[in-house]
Amino acid sequence: MEQDYSDFFPYEEFKPLQINAMDFVSEVVESKTIGLFEAYCGFGKTIATFAPVLAAGKKILLLTPTYSARNAATAEALKINKVKGKKIRIADLRGKQVMCRKFEKDFFSHEACLNAVKYKKDCEYYSNTFSKNRMLSKEASSTISNLQRTVTENPQKFFGSGLIEKEPLFFQAFQKTCDSKGLCSYEIMKKMIEEADIVILDYFWCFTGIFHILKKLINPKEFVLLVDEADMLVERLYTDFQVQLGLQGLQRLSKQAGLLLSSGELQETDIEFLSEFIRHASEFIQKNNPERPLEPQVIIDFFVKKFRENAREQGLEGNIGFETIIENLSTVAEAISGSEEFEKASARPDIFLAHLEKIKNSSEYLSFISKAKNRIIVKPFEINSIVLANGMTLYSTLKEFQSAILFSATLGDSVLFQKELGLNPEETKIFKAASMPHKNLLVLIDTELDSTYKARDRNFFEYIEKIKAIRQADNSLLVSCCNSFEAEKILKELPFLENAEQAENLLPEKTYVLNIRTKHARSTNKAKRMRNCIIIGLPLPDYSDFYFKQRKDYLEKKYGKSEAGRLINGKAVHTAVQLMGRITRDLTSPKTITLADRRYVRDFFLGDFYFKSIPDYLKPYIKTVDSTQKLKMEIRAFWQNAKMEQD
């Protein structure tokens, strides 16, 4: 089927398995289903999804959490335009805080932005972008036309050297153009989304309450949804999905409501009701202990009691019900969200209370006050069937699009992944690359030690010896630890180590230490030139976290310890594999990776679960050692052979 994709494939030849992957993508698009796609870093997953989707005549919405992935996706689209003469239009919308030029980054807030734009009328960028009837100004329209013309007719201009294979500067050039003309780049890019063939956004545009804003810009049924770094989606949903009642958000909501008072869209009684609610919320948070489970009914009863007491003090009947409280708060929030003055309300206490009412008899959620004592949080123990902040489940959100493909270097157990996301197996297709054409790779699993909490101090100096042993064979080494405490301790013990987080790029002749849980573990540019990497331990979740402990207990009661362990610890190998992918991305350079924890082979509780979670494409390169001496011998022999081959 090469001919089917060649019109949108800007390279001279296909990489191994790319045709298979493209056939898979085509099948998913044709059948309007959901696809899971796992392949190694350097496979070309982005173009392997782009080409068949565009060949099918569909538009693309790419969700990705990283700037490097955004740039890579933009590069592929620009290459298609340059090499194949296509006229693909691109939109890459980033956070308003990043794009705003009215306020410095540290002083930006959505409230300040809206206030400047709508009320004080003193944002020159916004004024230059729109005419009085909120139509685009001539300058804004001309800028969009010129940018689109460059994208479709002269795409090489977005590459620093003019060479099409270099990382593009599309977003930077776009921002610079808007700045030079005094235009609001955020509003300009939103307009570009309406006509774009490829739209690039962060996850939250689909999986949070602003999905309705996106649907005003595009018709999802015209788009195939591509979710990059799909293993991160699970973590993001657990981390970000929460219905909360925060005092800071309520204060912002109060200010927004006050601005609408003079326009007549809200009444004085609405403002007074909201103010009273904020007082009661503050009292509840201050009275209750943080990080203790709260019964939803207790919260509900508190607000009803307080409103009734206050009403009686004013000589009223004092029989207000919970539904009325929600309705009154909804009046305020809906007035703000429905007004042309605002994109959305800063907080939705009505949704929070309605959610409490809905789950008050459910054991599937945890309600608690955060340790900082400034908000009440409700989080689910599972995400497979919950209603997201966009009003739909994850599965129903994916089905809003013509089809959806979730891809990553690591998805782990496919059955487990589908179970976590609540996907329908009958409507889910799976593709996993079974091999990886790396010319010279060694993956060692050192089974001598494990880095469990109890053994951490006891084994510390033995891990130090392993680091020294690898470095004796080759100075180019990235030492990855599972937490900042270990990373800092190793930095103090080994003065030749440098902190990877403080380096713009990792130089291949140096030795660095990195906390694997930071964003740098997924940074392609930082680690791609390093020749060796040791991952000390298995990056398991933080077992001391209050929410995690409660979720663990819930899952163990529901599924038993074994299945619960798989669900809560599954992302550990994902984290390790993602870092490995940054090292091994260049498939022609010799590399060694050491997984220094016996649990990668066999865990006391979960057996070989972690080993099975390692992608199949890495399995042929794996060897096991059980001592520092054997580790040293294997790596020394590897580099001796690699040097001989180079000579």
Image (tube, rainbow, N blue to C red):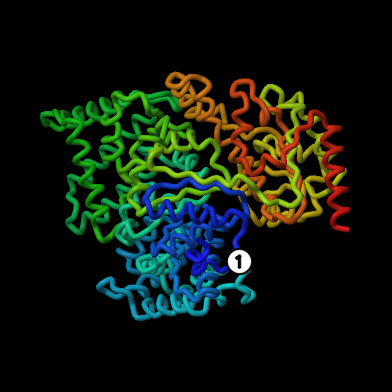
Q: Nearer the viewer, residue 426 or 97?
A: 426
Question: What is the total number of numbered labels drawn onto the structure image?
Answer: 1
Task: Please tell me which residue is depicted at 39% across the width and 30% down the height of the picture.
Answer: 286
Q: Is residue 133 above or below residue 482?
A: below
Q: Which residue is mark 1?
A: 167
Q: Quadrant of residue 303?
A: top left
Q: Assign a secondary structure to mark 1.
A: loop
Is residue 479 visible from the viewing direction of this image? Answer: no
Q: Is residue 646 above or below residue 349?
A: below
Q: Amino acid at mark 1?
A: Glu
Q: Nearer the viewer, residue 439 or 65?
A: 439
Quadrant that contains the C terminus? bottom right
Task: Please tell me which residue is depicted at 81% across the width and 29% down the height of the picture.
Answer: 462
Task: Please tell me which residue is depicted at 17% across the width and 45% down the height of the picture.
Answer: 269
Q: Nearer the viewer, residue 600 or 6?
A: 6
Q: Is residue 145 left or right of residue 80?
A: left
Tell me residue 605's x, y (percent): 60, 21
Task: Please tell me which residue is depicted at 40% across the width and 33% down the height of the picture.
Answer: 379
Q: Is residue 392 left or right of residue 67?
A: left
Q: Nearer the viewer, residue 152 or 303?
A: 152
Q: Is residue 244 left or right of residue 320?
A: right
Q: Quadrant of residue 576?
A: top right
Q: Is residue 92 above or below residue 539?
A: below
Tell me residue 597's x, y (percent): 71, 30
Q: Is residue 636 above or below residue 322?
A: below
Q: Quadrant of residue 314?
A: top left
Is residue 552 visible from the viewing direction of this image? Answer: yes
Tell me residue 526's x, y (percent): 68, 54
Tell me residue 372's x, y (percent): 47, 34
* Structural crowding at the residue carrying mark 1, measured as other residues with C-alpha within 10 Å and reported as few (<14), some (14–19) or many (≥20): some
